[in-house]
Image (cartoon, grey):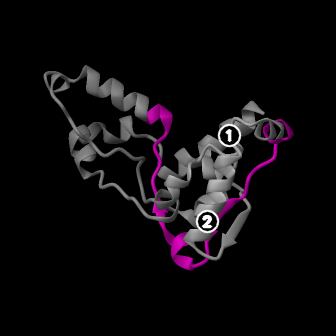
Amino acid sequence: MGAFRGTPNGKSERAKRMRNKGTRLPCMLPRGQQYLDNRIQFIHVDDMARLLRHILQREPEARRLTVLNVAGRGEPLTFAKCIEMAHAKLVRVPGKWVMRQVLSLLWKYKISAIPPQALPYMTGEYIMNTDRLQRFLGPEYEDVIRYTIADAFADSFRRDTAAA
């Protein structure tokens, strides 16, 4: 989410000045359509809270370990769609090596809070199967997980705008 927001969340004075000025870092990806086509999932914070409440209220299953993949309803978003929805500037770099170098510099100078080790997550696709979550919640699924992935993503930007 931080990469799409572009907030310079590092701890340096420069990052602080950039935040105060409202400067956004561009979203960076290597060249190649496959990076824009990678998909990603989100969950709305309110849905996560409802899910935790639901799990804790369930008896007797709440007393045993339950492992669930959690994401909002609907289809994952492509990175391209996320960049569009976030109104982020996209910068294409020649490859993953260059992207790692830029991430390393932003990390070294404490401008970004995204470590260079996050590169695989920023250039790969990690989609969870939520069928078990849907079976676990049964008919209550849509009451607990109310937001689609797209709506959850969009709402995180609406809140930023409202707070500003």
- Residue 99's disc is 2
| Amino acid type, mark 2 | Met
Q: Is residue 25 magenta?
A: yes
| Amino acid type, mark 1 | Asn
Placement of 57 over or under 14, stated as above or below: above
Placement of 14 over or under 78, stated as above or below: above
Question: Of the residues under marks 2 and 1, which one precedes in the sequence?
Answer: 1
Q: Is residue 79 left or right of residue 134?
A: right
**For this rendering, which residue is in front, 114 or 78?**
114
Quadrant of the snapshot with the C terminus: top right
- The mark total stands at 2
**For this rendering, which residue is in front, 2 or 48?**
2
Residue under label 1, please give it: 9
Q: Is residue 144 left or right of residue 114?
A: left
Q: How many C-alpha atoms fall within 10 Å of the one at disc 1: few (<14), some, or many (≥20)? A: some
Q: Residue at x 74, y 53 (%)?
A: 25
Q: Position of residue 89 (x, y in %)?
A: 74, 61
Q: Is residue 110 magenta?
A: no
Placement of 36 over or under 118, stated as above or below: below
Per the image, label 1 sits on a secondary structure element best described as loop
The extreme right residue here reads 21
Q: Residue at x 71, y 67 (%)?
A: 91
Indicate which label's residue lies in the foreground, 2 or 1.
2
Q: Is residue 119 left or right of residue 71?
A: right
Q: Residue at x 45, y 64 (%)?
A: 124
**For this rendering, which residue is in front, 17 or 64?**
17
Q: Position of residue 29 (x, y in %)?
A: 61, 67
Magenta residues, start to end = 18-47
